[in-house]
């Protein structure tokens, strides 16, 4: 990685922060400069290896913003610590690429960017759902290939989702936002699987159902599945919204795929390894009316053999959060995490991180995942 592939913003800043990719927008730069940082940004779109990043950290580095494509483990956190580092933020809400225990061991706070990508990711899950259900990719390829000879009664028959049953695995922020879009927009009954009961989601569905019945329309049901198997058997469309860890790796395997309805739809905008992708390819080959919509892949950026050839798979390259507003917001949150830790501020525990996008944001870090372990104080207002 040559020096010419890095640019410097606010060269007179006294604290040195490295950022391993260019981020959209300008506000994140102003946030760090406002905290007295000199910011060194890697302008190359090549993915940085651990040695590349270690070289960039060098002998003096106060903080870093890294990407989900990088392996932030013991080697990088010990290098950051030795260089005087006091803060790291992932430019993502997910942080399965970060060894948080290693960071904690070295006393380094780890930030992430929750809140700003909730709706964008949920919208992409909706887009994939309908692209899969209505065979958008397949039929577009057919049209572009000049095969469309005129309207036919059975051309690309798909699935109607209106008033069918939606299954959500993981009813956190994004799962809930997606569920609400599908329930409100398409009057789907909801079944969810989560380790915790999600009363606000249940109340939302029951209030919405009462509203519909007050207008003379049929009600909508919501229930919490006892087991993931129950959900897979019952749902017409299943969307995955769980974090990746050892307990969720290959959560969807061949055995569980076989429990799903023959013409079910499976959506993944969370992390690729939650699905055993080889098993998925085999299942899709065998069941042509089973459809999948994927934003994330097990060996990202590689696809398992056969996946790209499946007509019943809609695949996009991990772009669920890719709207200008969202990606700029992620930059602001990541920069604020690092700036706040370098300034000795507490961690925000208020209900929403969107306040950090407003004028006069709180003097706090939006989200530090190991704040408790490191004994960093929190504030709520
Ligand atoms: C995240 O933030 O974890 C997403 O996968 C990237 O948008």
Image (cartoon, helix red, strand yellow):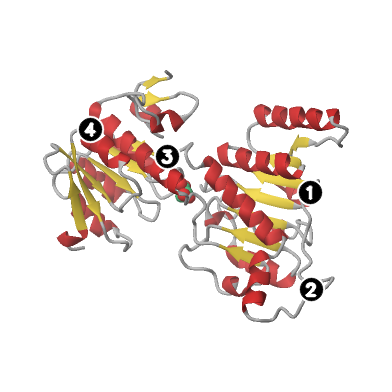
Q: Is residue 231 left or right of residue 281?
A: right
- The 10 Å Cα crowd at callout 2, few under 14, some 14 to 19, many 20 or more, is few
Q: Quadrant of residue 87?
A: top left
Question: Which numbered disc, 1 or 3, marks the residue closer to the eye?
Answer: 1
* Residue 9 in view: yes
- The 10 Å Cα crowd at callout 3, few under 14, some 14 to 19, many 20 or more, is many
Marks 1 and 3 sit apart, C-alpha to C-alpha, by 33 Å
- Callouts 1 and 4 close, C-beta under 8 Å: no
- On the image, the x and y values in percent for residue 275 come to 59, 57
Residue position for label 2: 151
Residue position for label 4: 34
Label 1 CB-ligand 1 distance < 8 A:
no
- Callouts 1 and 3 close, C-beta under 8 Å: no
Q: Nearer the viewer, residue 285 or 31?
A: 31
Label 3 CB-ligand 1 distance < 8 A:
yes
Residue 113's tag is 3
């Amino acid at each position: 990685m040559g020096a010419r592939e890095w640019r410097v913003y606010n060269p007179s800043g006294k604290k040195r922060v490295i950022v391993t990719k260019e981020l959209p927008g300008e506000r994140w730069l102003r946030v760090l400069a406002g905290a007295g940082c000199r910011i060194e940004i890697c302008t190359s779109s090549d993915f940085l290896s651990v040695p590349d990043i270690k070289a960039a950290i060098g002998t003096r580095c106060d903080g870093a913003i890294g990407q989900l494509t990088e392996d932030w483990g013991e080697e990088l956190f010990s290098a950051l610590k030795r260089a005087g580092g006091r803060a790291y933020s992932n430019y993502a809400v997910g942080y399965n690429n970060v060894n948080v225990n290693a960071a904690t061991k070295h006393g380094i706070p780890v930030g992430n960017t929750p809140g700003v990508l909730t709706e964008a990711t949920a919208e992409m899950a909706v887009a994939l759902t309908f692209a899969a259900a209505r065979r958008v990719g397949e039929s577009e390829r057919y049209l572009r290939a000049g095969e469309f000879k005129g309207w036919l009664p059975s051309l690309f028959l798909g699935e109607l989702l209106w008033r069918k049953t939606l299954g959500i695995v993981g009813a956190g922020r994004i799962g809930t936002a997606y569920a609400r879009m599908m329930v409100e927009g398409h009057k789907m009954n909801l079944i969810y699987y989560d380790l915790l009961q999600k009363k606000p989601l249940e109340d939302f569905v029951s209030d919405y159902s009462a509203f519909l019945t007050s207008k003379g329309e049929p009600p909508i049901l919501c229930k919490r599945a006892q087991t993931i198997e129950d959900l897979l058997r019952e749902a017409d469309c299943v969307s995955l919204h769980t974090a990746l860890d050892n307990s969720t790796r290959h959560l969807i395997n061949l055995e569980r795929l076989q429990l799903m309805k023959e013409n079910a739809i499976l959506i993944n905008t969370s992390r690729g390894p939650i699905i055993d992708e080889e098993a998925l390819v085999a299942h899709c080959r065998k069941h042509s009316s089973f459809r999948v919509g994927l934003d994330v892949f097990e060996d990202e950026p590689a696809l398992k053999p056969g996946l790209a050839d499946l007509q019943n798979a809609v695949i996009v390259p991990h772009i669920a959060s890719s709207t200008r507003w969202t990606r700029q917001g992620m930059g602001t949150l990541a920069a604020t995490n690092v700036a706040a830790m370098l300034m000795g501020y507490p961690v925000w525990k208020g209900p929403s991180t969107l306040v950090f996008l407003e004028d006069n944001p709180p003097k706090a870090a939006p989200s530090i995942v190991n704040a408790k372990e490191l004994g960093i104080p929190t504030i709520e207002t």
